[in-house]
Amino acid sequence: MSPVYWTGVSVAAELGLFLSPWILSKAPLAFWGVLLIHLALSMLAAAAIYFLLPSRFQRPRLSVTMLLFAFALVAPVIGALGLMVIALVNLRKPAGDLGFANPVSLDLPLYDVQSEDQRHSSQGAIRSRLGKGVPDSIRMQSLLTLQAVPNRVSNPILEDLLGDETEDVRLIAFGMLDAAETKITQEIRQETDRLALQRTDSQRYQSLQRLAGLNWELVYACLIQGGLRAHILQQASNHIDAALALAVPPDSGLVFLQARIRLALGDAEGAKAAISHALELGQPRVSALPYLAEIAYKKRNFQEVAQLMLQLSQLNLASRTRAIEDFWCRRDNEIDYRDRKYLPHI
């Protein structure tokens, strides 16, 4: 039998109970009899209405049941009847709308993981939305979206906006740059304090490695310029030298970072030697060959650049690196307009 039937039985019994002469009797036995029967019928009504509720309203089970019981107990007949009407009219879904998902097979879209972000967040697209002729509402929205763009791309754009005519744009650009620089500076200060407490060579090595990386991040993210840039680069180089002087096996990543710092300082030969050392320690060639090609390009040794790019073409490359490799290996027989996003920024 359905829950509606049992709810109807409890309501009819309640109605008969409260219309019976027992309700007017002053005998103690009649009082306790009416009370016990009312409790039993209220519990029956609560249990029946519970099964009328959708599953999403049946948890937690004990609390829901006791709440229904309380309504039926406090308001005889009307309470149980009202709860049944609410459950049937307002809470029950139509039989054809059960909310079950129907699986559908879809073809995967063509998607280039390595270059999709460039399509939407290239420097040219961002700068065009921040131009002076663009409405202020669009400029402010585009400015806030820079928070999702890598710092190396967003920070030079923010730097240019510090002289903007709109005060709100200037303030937001300054705040974003200052927040990024403050965060890294605080981490450097905390790591410096931690370094003073380190006792073992392994602990000191890790702290020095992190300090070098944080100082390099200030430069790589374009947060500092001018003479301070050279000072921070030298600080990072000193941290690396101190780490490599410890009795700890060197890490290829730290040596490779040393090469990048030396290249940024203009020491091409020192950078090349550090890259060779990093390769001996296990640094992947796919990350080292572009820097070797850059060093060869600075020396105007274009034949070596082409040879290095030919080696690079045999490895798994990102889209922006492949655009440069195609150019140097003379594989661009057709114009690929997607390359125009990569070539100016490499």
Image (spheres, helix red, strand yellow):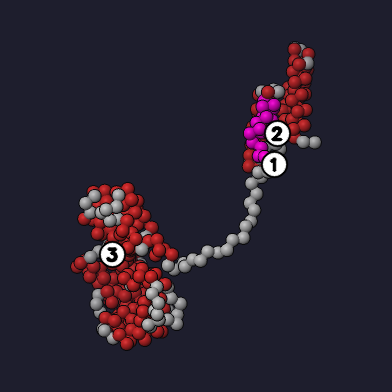
Horizontal side, residue 181 vs residue 79: left or right: left
Q: Looking at the picture, which amino acid does disc 3 mark?
A: Cys
Q: Amino acid at mark 1?
A: Ala
Q: Which residue is mark 2?
A: 49
Please give the name of the residue rendered at 78% of the width and 16% of the height, measured from the top-left corner: 20
**Secondary structure mostly seen in the magenta stretch:** helix
Query: Is disc 1 surrounded by few (<14), some (14 to 19) or many (20+) residues within 10 Å?
Result: few
Q: Residue at x 32, y 56 (%)?
A: 129
Query: What amino acid type is highlighted by mark number 2?
Result: Ile
- For the C terminus, the quadrant is bottom left
Question: Pointer 3: residues within 10 angstroms few (<14), some, or many (20+)?
Answer: some
Q: CA distance from mark 1 to mark 2?
A: 18 Å
Tell me the mark number nearer the camera, choosing from 1 and 2.
1
Residue in the picture at 33% in, 86% down: 304
Measured from the top left, where is residue 320 in percent x and y? Answer: 39, 72
First to last magenta residue range: 79-94
Q: Measuring from the top left, give residue 142's x and y in whole percent.
A: 34, 54
Q: Which circle's residue, 2 or 3, is located before the other in the chain?
A: 2
> Residue at 19% across / 68% down in the picture?
227
Among the 4 quarters of the image, the one containing residue 16: top right
